[in-house]
Amino acid sequence: MENVCAAALARGGMTAKFDQAVEIVNAYYTEAAYQLADGYAVENSYYGVYPKIDGTFDSPLSAIDPVRNKIEFAFRVLRKLQKVADEVRIDLLGLENVEGCVAEVLDVSSGSVDRNITSGGMVTITGHKISAKIYQIPRMPLDIIRVILY
C-alpha cells in the first residue's frame, strides 16, 4: 500500500502527506476486510469484491463447517478500472519459452518408465509446465489421467 501512496504522491494525484495517505488507505482496506468478513460486498468505482460461502449444508439451520464451507471472494472489474485497462498499451520485450512437455512417466509400483501403468499404483510425472488431474471412474479397471500442458 505504501508503494501505491508514494506513486500517487509522485504522480500528483494526492494532496495528503505520505503518512496520512498510508493511514487513510490502510483504514479503508481494514474496514473493507471487515465488511467482506461480515458477508457484505465491497465496491468502489474501480472494482467490486463479493464474498461467497461454498460447499454443502446438512440443513437450512446447520452451522457453517469451516472445512466444508470455505469463504471465497469474487473480483469484478467495474467501469473506471475497465476504462484504465482499455487505455493500456502493451510493449512486448520478448517471449519466454512457453512450451510444456512430459519428460518422463514413472510407474512407481513396477519401476517401468514411459510404458504401461499399474492399475491402482502410483505414478510420477516429470516435465515442464504440467497440470495433471486424476479421475476415478466406477467400474473401470484404470483411472483416467488427463495431463494438460500449459
Image (tube, rainbow, N blue to C red):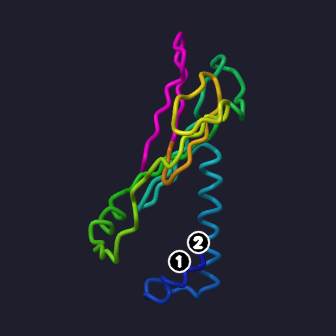
> Can residue 138 be found in the magenta stretch?
yes
Residue 150 in the image: above or below residue 80 = above
Say which residue label 1 marks.
Answer: 4
| Quarter assignment of residue 83 | bottom left
In this rendered view, identify the residue nearer to me: 76 or 95: 95
Q: What stretch is highlighted in magenta?
A: 132-150
| Quarter assignment of residue 105 | top right
Taking the image as shown, residue 150 lies to the left or right of residue 73, namely left
> Can residue 39 be found in the magenta stretch?
no
Say which residue label 2 marks.
Answer: 25
Q: Which residue is drawn at 59% across and 22% down?
A: 119
Task: Classify the position of the N terminus by image quarter.
Answer: bottom right
In this rendered view, identify the residue nearer to me: 66 or 92: 92
Q: Residue at x 52, y 14 (%)?
A: 140
Q: Which residue is drawn at 71% across and 33% down?
A: 67
In this rendered view, identify the residue nearer to me: 86 or 48: 86
In this rendered view, identify the residue nearer to me: 103 or 31: 103
Whole-percent x and y of residue 149?
43, 47
Whole-percent x and y of residue 143?
54, 23
| Quarter assignment of residue 142 | top right
Q: Are marks 2 and 1 in contact (CB under 8 Å)?
A: yes
As measured in the structure, the alpha-carbon distance from the residue carrying label 2 to the one carrying label 1 is 10 Å
Q: Residue at x 45, y 60 (%)?
A: 44
Whole-percent x and y of residue 80?
34, 64
| Amino acid type, label 2 | Val
